[in-house]
Amino acid sequence: MFRQAVKYVCAIAGFLVITGIAAPSAAAAQGVDFAAGYSFLRDNELANSGEVSGNLAKGIFASLGVGVGPWLSLVGEVASNRRTFDELGTEIELKVDFYGAGVRVRGRSGAARPYGQVLFGAARGRLSGFGLSESGSEFAWQPGAGVDAYFSRSVGLRFGVNGRFIQAEDLTAKEFQVIVGLVFGGR
């Protein structure tokens, strides 16, 4: 299933890139934005298990957007969140990484630029402790929304929330992410 999903994501990304190349003057006029900062993640499956808190509060994100029109951008994003906890006197580390690409629709309201986006990619989880390590990757998609609030011509703050749906074979894991960081360019 993962390979099939990757094929669809690549086909969609290829179409969007070709569309962007067909209108190079629009892409050049819209420019590029880069954002990076703090990421907080809540994993609902962990929270519902009752054994471990579902909050992965140690996290970072980075996002790159390339404008292909006055309100449309192609976006790539990575995020990494982790949590350590003690189990039977041993430190256990849980790490969740997300790698995705998709589209962002942007609005304009003075110095604020609200946006909505949807990304498709992969989530990779790793659990290590007791001298063992287990990891795996699954297809994931992430709808989200937020606002870039500029305080100068090319620097601002990004506030965003994302829902993440990880498609495993027998269930769909749900995560909720909050991001806060600096954004450069894109105005």
Image: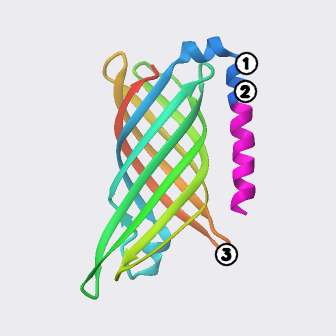
Horizontal and vertical percent for residue 168? 63, 68
Q: Which residue is mark 2?
A: 18
Secondary structure category for the residue under label 3: loop
Horizontal and vertical percent for residue 182? 34, 33
Q: Which label sits on residue 22?
A: 1
Camera-side mark, 2 or 3: 2
Instruction: Say what amino acid the circle numbered 2 marks.
Output: Ile
Q: Identify the colour scheme used.
A: rainbow
Tell me where the magenta segment starts and ends, as one range.
1-16
Q: Where the N terminus falls, by quadrant?
A: bottom right
Q: Which label sits on residue 170?
A: 3
Is residue 3 part of the magenta span, yes or no? yes
Instruction: Say what amino acid the circle numbered 3 marks.
Output: Asp
The residue depicted at 41 percent of the width and 64 percent of the height is 95
Secondary structure category for the residue under label 2: helix
Instruction: Say what amino acid the circle numbered 1 marks.
Output: Ala
The residue depicted at 49 percent of the width and 23 percent of the height is 32
**Disc 3, disc 1: CB below 8 Å?**
no
